[in-house]
Amino acid sequence: MSLITHIYYVWKKITVSGLRSADNPHDRKSLLFINRLSILNVLAMVAFSISAPLFNLPDVLFFTIPFMFAFGLPPYLNHTGRLEFCRYYFALIPLLFLIGVCIHNSAGLGDKYLLVTTATLPLILFKNKRTIYLIFGLNILSFFLITLYQTNFEPLVKLSQTGQWIYSTCSVLMVFSVIFFIVQYFRADSEEYEEELEEKNKEISQKNTEIIDSITYAKRLQEAILPPEATIYNSVPDSFILYKPKDIVAGDFYFAEQKDDYFFVAAADCTGHGVPGAMVSLVCSNALNKAVSELELKKPGEILDKVTEMVVDTFKKGHTDIKDGMDISLCVINTKTREVAWAGANNPLWYVNNDNELKEITANKQPVGKSEKYASFTTHILNLAKGTLVYLFTDGYADQFGGPKGKKFKYKQLADLILRNTGLSMSEQRAALDSTFTDWKGNIEQVDDVCIIGIKL
């Protein structure tokens, strides 16, 4: 092993002394900083001790040699696991050393300006602001006290003109060396942090891409269970669907099924939105489809009762108590007689008659799913005239924040909007609802999924 290799090995060994006992990144960085600067301080003391006889200052050895050992103590303290004590020790020892040096030397040597370097130590070593301010303030106080002392008292040692120049030059070099070390420390720390941050950003970006890809594929699956809009338009040509998910996938969904002379149509709002809402919507949509297609139920109240039973049964299979479900507005329209049977869970039915009056049929105040006081859903039979406009919807449109004051749109404003547009075709009504929602929302984030179905009998 060469001498340089051996020196590097010793430097590395001392530098990492006690590193295993450091619990967090800040402690590890503080420990490495203390150990490295301790080695530099010891080397500086050795240089001062060697040069003291050259300046005919043998008395300085009584001062530099004890501090040589004092500056070499921090790595040992860290090795024994006393990092917190070592922080305070390392913040104060250089200050005490410089106070002694300034008392020993004259003001002309400028030793007091070395306090600039010691004042930076608490900023590096401590996270507690009170401790930082206290030790930083102690350095400022020491600077003024030293200035006061050097103004009123003679120095203990007087150097020749040449000696003062050499000493001042060494002091300046010492200041620059320490500042360089501190700046280099921060630079290395910053570069390390930036590299780590860049690596984490890449990892996060990759995971985010994977998640988005998964959710996008989930959207395709969700769209596969949604009936094509053509299903509604073929059964009831004069109609529209306004469907605006908040996220890529949605908790809201619409349902449409033609069975003989009966057309089933619903706007449903499952618990939550995004991925959780979409998962609940799969369960609820599957149950609704089973009740209509397989069990061939035709009364909307009975359909919701059966769907409730299936949803509760699905979610109770696990060990976790899940109360998720859906609010829904479900119509069963006899396309020959125009008789409308309707049932709702929390969401009402609106219809506008030929006198341009908006009527509301109130829903059962319970969800499709687990509830404390369950009652069978009520089926409402409506004999509506030809040309009556029927609206099924979830709460997302009315609950959207926006407008000049950032408030909710609310159902009253939605009802007024529908009444203003009843003279338009159903496609034009959809366009009016869509543009009004966009204008109302403005730059505010969409708060929930939106689903509105309009049908002209």
Image (spheres, rainbow, N blue to C red):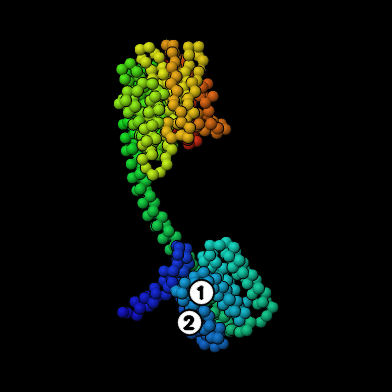
Q: Residues within 10 Å of mark 1 (few under 14, many from 20)?
A: some
Can you tell which mark lies on residue 118? none
Q: Is residue 259 left or right of residue 68?
A: left
Could you say where residue 172 lies in the image, as x and y percent from the top left? 53, 73
Can you tell which mark lies on residue 46? 2
**Is residue 214 in sight in this rendering?**
yes
Can you tell which mark lies on residue 174? 1
Report the front residue among 433 and 1. 433
Location of the C terminus by quadrant is: top left
Report the front residue among 24 and 381. 381
Location of the N terminus by quadrant is: bottom left
- For this orientation, the residue located farthest to the right is 152
Residue at x 51%, y 66% (from the top left corner) = 125
Could you say where residue 58 lies in the image, as x and y percent from the top left? 54, 88
Using the image, determine if residue 358 lies above or below residue 143.
Answer: above
Using the image, determine if residue 322 lies above or below residue 94.
Answer: above
Report the front residue among 140 and 426. 426
Figure label count: 2
